[in-house]
Image (spheres, helix red, strand yellow):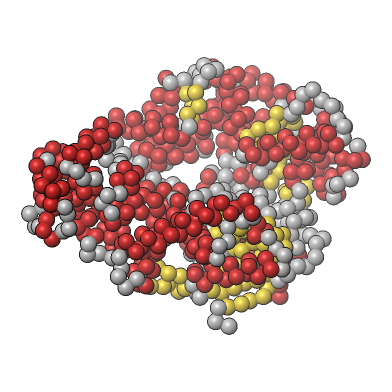
Amino acid sequence: MPSLFDNLNPEQKKAVEHTLGPLLVFAGAGSGKTRVITYRIANLIAKHNVDPTDILAVTFTKKASEEMQQRIEAVFNELKLQFSTRPLIGTFHSICALILRSEGRLTGLDPNFSIYDTDDSVSLVKELMLAADIDIKQFQPKMIYSLIGSAKNDMISPKDYSLYNTGYVEDIVARIYPEYQSQLGELNAVDFSDLLYKVVKIFDESNTALSKYQDRFKHILVDEYQDTNKVQYNLIKMLAQKHQNICVVGDDDQSIYKWRGADIRNIISFEKDFDDVTTVKLEQNYRSVKNVISAATAVIKRNNERVDKILWTSREQGEPVLIYQARDEKDEAQYVVDEMLSLRNDGWSLSDFAVLYRTNYQSRVIEEALLKRGIPYKLVGGFRFYDRKEVKDLLSYLRILNNLRDDVSLYRIINVPNRKMGPKSVAELVKLSKECGCTVAEVLVISHILLDESLSIEDFVFDSEKVTKVEHNLEKINRFRALVELFGSLYVQSQALNVLELIDVLLQKIKYIEFIDDGSDAAEMKKENVQELRNVAASYAEKDSEKSLNNFLQDIALIESEQERNKKDINEGAVTLMTLHSSKGLEFPGVFMIGMEEGIMPHSRSFTEPAELEEERRLCYVGITRAKERIWLTFTESRSSIGGYSDQIPSRFLGEIPQEICDYYSWNI
């Protein structure tokens, strides 16, 4: 089939033509790995007469599996191939769900079992914790569920959990995990982690079941193999053991999901797991200019735990890597926007640009800079800063304290954190407020002032008729004493505190950090967003002579209004904002990587762990290799923090890039 190979380089062709036995394909960034996988499948079917139903292709996301199916159809159409059947292409979870529907009885499941989503699973864990008299405020159900999922991904059974994990939290997991699995069994249900965990258990305990699927899937292909965890690794190894026709494609240099259980050793040790492995390295990059490739290579080669590869490109040298030292994060954002606008005058489109950052909170300053200049943007894999739940929660509290008539904001957070205020209780409170001719917030605040002997209602501006009606209903209102004390005391304190001080009092009173901290990486991002809101408040307190809550909320409302207008402009082309993790698999003509500072990129959590630092370096490599034409790396001299600014140290990764391919600029030159 000459037409099939016309578009392949020698190494790609070698991977596509390989037919029998284990094949390991190291696919560097931008090296055309999806083309290799799809052409390989087409080659097996068209040239070697492999039955399409004998082929299994595994991806990590539904989007990736759909794209692979579309590409295979396109290749079939291009070659005018006609087949009535197709290979099975799907995610690990979808394929295991299919197997479990057929073989679930071997593990006590009826074929019509339910698959619980995260919310269902967390609710079940919560029920079991309450039944066991475990404090769900101290040990959040979501955190316990997450640790149970991690145990399943590591193939650790409920019975063995305590043998591998010790600690106070782990003791709670050891108590709940067996009960959770037992309850799922009674409900004829599984969670997402069970889909793989139970299939591997079935294969481990039933040679008949294993042999059935080994013979069904005689040719197996796995994409993004560097991202596999232990249970996925075991599944693939078991399925491929009989026929050994296993092709794994991946790049150890792009392994950035250790925090999700991915084990880079799975791809590095593949040659030890199977006999007579053929290894192919796809090192030609079709995406980026030479300077981008040189910068990325200089960074990644410092890692010790990697397979040696030399990424290269036949493209032109390209513009130098541009490294900019900003005065602070506002100057950094302004520089990014100025560069974009300058290049737009040279014919670039706004959609050509991406701004990449290590953590979500960094988007806030960039968002505001773009909005001020009327530049549309879109956030990938996340919410705009002021749309993030934790930010909206705290702003809702502040809006209530600023405007006691804002019951919409009150209803949003009346159960945040959970106060067990059901619909009946809320309805009763609303009814009481109407009887008093007040809003709910007014009832709570006036009641607090009347009940607190150290306060005088005359010191506050309230309608006397409302005060009288509340006074007559104090006995009924007293049922909601906790709410009265909370909102009343916050309101009283809000009269004397600046915005930052008020936020800190609020966080302490409602124990919000404890509420959002379930021990997950997502919780860390939420805490960083709360800290960034504190930074906004601190900055505002410095520049606003009145230091008023009303002015602060007004400014934020104007920003939110700009964001709404920005959403309408996105169709005309927009800048893309995203975390480095979200950028994997994407490409842009121009890429700005901001916050290239020690403690941010690399993250401070990596300073004491060599393996974590190597993962940060891989993350930097992924970011740089998103750029097709130009890359900007920016860092700040100082960054705002509570009470002033903290000096920043440039990222070590910047010093690893050859000076001869860089241009350096600074705010003070």
Where residue 148 appears, x then y in whole percent? 44, 36
Q: In percent of the image, x 43 and y 59: which residue is there?
A: 558
Q: In percent of the image, x 27 and y 49: which residue is there?
A: 405
Question: Can residue 224 be spotted in the picture?
Answer: yes
Q: In percent of the image, x 55 and y 59: which residue is there?
A: 357
Left or right: where 308 falls relative to 419: right
User: Which residue is most to the left?
Assistant: 453
Left or right: where 454 falls relative to 47: left
Question: Can residue 41 be spotted in the picture?
Answer: no
Where residue 290 appears, x then y in whole percent? 76, 64
Tell me if residue 145 comes above or below residue 507 in the rendering: above
Q: In percent of the image, x 65 and y 32: which residue is there?
A: 90
User: Which residue is most to the bottom?
Assistant: 669
User: Which residue is most to the right?
Assistant: 2
Choose between 75 and 258: the one closer to the eye.
75
Choose between 382 and 658: the one closer to the eye.
382
Q: How many marks?
A: 0
Choose between 669 and 169: the one closer to the eye.
669
Instruction: Identify the image quadrant of the N terminus.
Output: top right
Choose between 431 and 579: the one closer to the eye.
431
Where residue 611 appears, x then y in whole percent? 55, 55
Residue 625 in which image quadrant: bottom right
Left or right: where 190 falls relative to 252: left
Tell me if residue 195 comes above or below residue 471 in the rendering: above
Instruction: Identify the image quadrant of the C terminus.
Output: bottom right
Where residue 89 appears, x then y in whole percent? 69, 32
Residue 277 in which image quadrant: top right
Tell me if residue 205 comes above or below residue 271 in the rendering: above
